[in-house]
Amino acid sequence: MFDTYNRKINYLRVSVTDRCNLRCVYCMPEEGVKLLKHEDILSFDEITEVVKIAVELGFEKIRLTGGEPLVRKDITELVKMISSVKGIKDFGLTTNGIFLKRFAKDLKDAGLHRLNISLDTTHPEEYRKITRCGELKYVFEGIETAVKTGFKEIKINTVIDRFSDEKNARTVAKFAEENSLKIRFIRKMDLEKGTFWNVIGGEGGKCSICNRLRVSSDGMVTPCLFSDESFSVRKLGVKEAFIQAINSKPEKGVMSRAHKFYNIGG
């Protein structure tokens, strides 16, 4: 489908949980956040139906996000259910990598094509400072396992303050190069102030070619990170929620007080 600015909308990011095992300083408060009730979260059958109808409408690229998607119980079963949907050309998942050593092979066997792994530093103490609780060694083990598993592509997502030549960014770039991994630098954004920039090494942040919608873990379809509009798949039905979201997609993001990175999938 095309939006009102003639952009082909074919990329769907699906948040499968609002829960996360880290507390990254740029994502959520140290004390955590109020979590959704179990019954408010889309079931595996509902998520699969969302994806199926999205594909019928012309979506070809699906990415699972969170929170942290690997904390969702039986996540590999969901991946298997989605991978069975005919018409998906690109099926990925974004993770912080902490549990990746445990899940990498099962995810690949279930039909996942590729991974985006968050890594903001290669220094253990700095990593604990950024994440407030994370152990970097588990991320490195997860990346190593994922590489050996043979995913079609693995990208590293690195959040920066302003520039890709910052100290932490340089060390991550060196790590990515040594391990033949692609890297994307994502400058810190502020949803409420409406400040965002183009992703270095990716297409994110370029409003003129934006091709994505987002579905939150409670089933709200959002046309833009920097917009408060959203449409419920449960109240409207999946197809109608998509149609309304596409028709409401703004030419350029402005700001949002309703959304947070931890519940909309970034």
Image: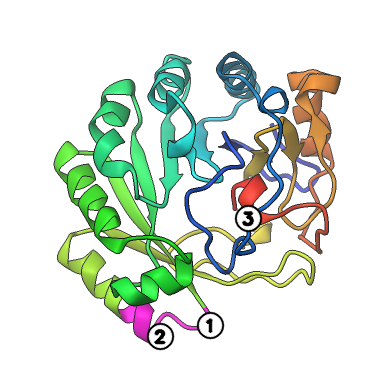
**86 lies left or right of 112:** right
**96 lies left or right of 154:** right
Part of the protein shown in magenta = 161-170
Picture coordinates of residue 233, whole percent (x, y):
76, 24
Q: Does label 3 or label 2 sit earlier along the sequence?
A: 3
Residue receiving disc 3: 32
Picture coordinates of residue 189, whole percent (x, y):
64, 69
**Mark 2 falls on what kind of element?**
loop
Query: Which residue type does callout 2 highlight?
Result: Glu
Circle 2 packing at 10 Å, graded few (<14), some (14-19), many (20+), is: few
Query: Which residue type does callout 1 highlight?
Result: Arg
**183 lies left or right of 252:** left
Say which quarter of the image contains residue 102: top left
Q: What residue do we see at 59% from left, 53% from top? A: 266
Q: Main secondary structure of the magenta part?
A: loop
**29 lies left or right of 113:** right
Circle 3 packing at 10 Å, graded few (<14), some (14-19), many (20+), is: some
Say which quarter of the image contains residue 107: top left
Distance, label 3 to label 1, CA atoms, is: 26 Å
Query: Which residue type does callout 3 highlight?
Result: Gly
Distance, label 3 to label 2, CA atoms, is: 28 Å
Picture coordinates of residue 112, whole percent (x, y):
35, 30
**Mark 2 near mark 1, Cβ–Cβ under 8 Å?**
yes
Say which quarter of the image contains residue 52: top right
Residue receiving disc 2: 166
Q: What residue do we see at 82% from left, 52% from top? A: 258
Residue receiving disc 1: 162
